[in-house]
Amino acid sequence: MPRILPIRHQPALPLDRLILREPPSAETMEMDVLIVGAGPAGLACAIELARLVKRDQETGGGMADLNIGVLEKAGSLGEHNLSGSVVNPRAFRELFPELQLSDLPFRQPVPNEAVYFLTGSRARRIPTPPTMHNSGYYTASICEMVRWLGERAEELGVNLFAGFPADALLVDGQAVRGIRTAPSGLDRERQPGPGYSDPTDLTARVTVIAEGTRGLLGQAWRAWQQVRSPNPQLFALGVKELWEVKRPLDAVVHTLGWPLPTNAFGGSFMYPLGPTQVALGLVVGLDYHDASLDVHELLQRMELHPLFRPQLEGGHLLEWGAKTIPEGGYYALPERRSGDGVLFAGDTVGFVDVPSLKGIHYAMQSGMYAARAAFAALKADDVSRQSLSAYDRMVDGSYIVADMRATRNMRLAFKDGLYVGGVKAGLMTLTGGRFPGGRIAMAEDARTPRTPSPAARFTPDGALTFSKVDAVFKSGNATRDTIPSHLIVGQDVTAEVAEFYSHMCPAGVYERVGNELRVNPPNCVDCKATDVLGPRWTPREGGSGPKYRAM
Ligand SMILES: Cc1cc2nc3c(=O)[nH]c(=O)nc-3n(C[C@H](O)[C@H](O)[C@H](O)COP(=O)(O)OP(=O)(O)OC[C@H]3O[C@@H](n4cnc5c(N)ncnc54)[C@H](O)[C@@H]3O)c2cc1C
Ligand code: SF4
């Protein structure tokens, strides 16, 4: 069978629809600072900004009140956030110096930690690589953290607009002036149905885009402004489950090896979330080679392994979800993350250190820097690219970029497979990132050819292992069936490509029926894997998608 090159079947980014040069509508809502995305980056930005204004006013600085708004596509805060999550509390401490660690929204301190190399039937404990030490950190639910941050933001007078997806950037010349939201209440043919509401235009003096992984607005802006990076951004897909368990887990656990093929990059995590809950997930680089690799299914198989099974048996699945992670690291950072009237923070930029699987504190810290740059620009009444470029300088001089630089080639080394990559990563750690010299060049994930192979059959038992249909139910997704498709599918999808998409999507949105592709858009949990390797993802009616509670 011929190999599949995903990029050949992927539609182009719909730039015309994402960058709108028309003037905002007459009923536009005007704000001073508009933040897109109520994740750790967006909310830390809002909180820091509101505090800077307050402090300035209290010390006689003369800053007027600012109208700060945060737009979120989920129906309520936290419902679209998913993470491991082991949190480095550094950014929380800086944002809330007045609070004790026990006041912060964490579940528990990291107790012990263990790393295992798995084969199909055994688990061999290996020394914890220096990049994977988590002592002094905390396990947490990102949904809970986001809801807590949202409350802090509201106390400071920030306006939170949940259920409002930003659909396009409103621009004027080279400047970003705000966003247009997605309409709601359309029927399958995109005609206004019951409960229809028009898109809303929101304008601002500064727009901060904190839309998370594989951000659409960020992609559009970089393409429009021709902002480059040395390497393209790479992604991994993480599928995660939250379990109620009978036995407490006493360590933060990571594994390498099985069930992944040796030419795929990734690993699993299992984290304790208090005495009765465990978070479990599998993360796989989207440059895998086997077209029938299915991350959801691999996670299900993994749960039957002797390392995991005794932990889960007798318990039950509480929640399921999926999300991509930007993995390109230092060399995939865009050369600038600021422009006229606009700043970009968090995962949409790619501030994630892959060897340690950490992004939350970098997202928050970058949001805080964005707040400082926006505050200074507004105070000086100059929101030009030059003025806002102070943000880039802050990020470049910070621990965010320093940490990413130290591990700059580590993920990239694994393009040669697990064993060669493992040896190279060890040398990189020993030399503080200096080995092997320059940059390892990478291509976009969609340019990695995929080899079709017969998929091994797996039948979930409904107790320890679950089908994609059951999994989507556990994500809380109750998107109405009559919603128009938000996925832009290419023209030439062959039977083999349809098969590849059906394995790639963890939520069963794509199915191969005969030789055709069938698409079930309401199932989508916004993980964005499709946007990396297949049909393009676009925002849809606010409140659609998953309703995570404690991911
Ligand atoms: C499986 C997995 C495990 C991870 N484990 C860890 C870990 O243990 N520790 C760690 O530190 N990091 C971990 N990370 C990474 C971490 O979760 C991210 O780096 C972090 O969440 C990034 O924060 P953010 O605010 O940039 O993006 P997000 O948390 O993704 O928030 C972005 C927000 O923007 C909203 N949004 C997106 N588009 C729009 C739009 N168009 N309009 C309106 N709203 C929009 C989203 O709904 C979301 O609420 C993990 C990630 C994954 C997927
Ligand atoms: S269709 Fe939705 S759930 Fe499926 S891969 Fe794409 S973004 Fe993820």
Image (cartoon, grey):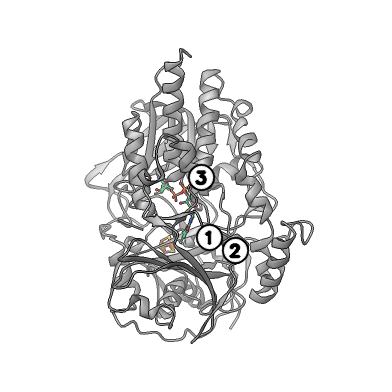
Of residues 307 and 502, the one drawn nearer to the viewer in this rendering: 307
Q: If the image is split into quadrants, where does the C terminus sit? A: bottom left
Instruction: Report the amino acid beneath label 2.
Output: Asp
Q: Which mark is residue 90?
A: 3
Residue 287 vs 462, above or below: the answer is above
Residue 407 placement (x, y as % from top left): 66, 56
Q: Are marks 2 and 1 in contact (CB under 8 Å)?
A: yes
Q: Return the residue at label 1.
A: 532
The kind of secondary structure element at disc 2 is helix
Q: Position of residue 330 (x, y in %)?
A: 65, 51
- Position in image of residue 199 (x %, y %): 34, 39
Q: Does residue 355 appear anywhere in the picture?
A: no
| Label 2 packing within 10 angstroms: few (<14), some (14-19), many (20+) | many
Judging depth in this view, the residue of 148 and 199 nearest the camera is 148
| Amino acid type, mark 1 | Val
- Return the disc, 2 or 1, that comes first in the chain's sequence: 2
Q: Relative to 336, say whether 414 is above or below.
A: below
Q: Tell me the number on the disc at residue 445.
A: 2
Can you tell which quarter of the image residue 427 is in?
bottom right
Query: Between marks 2 and 3, how big is the CA–CA gap?
Result: 32 Å
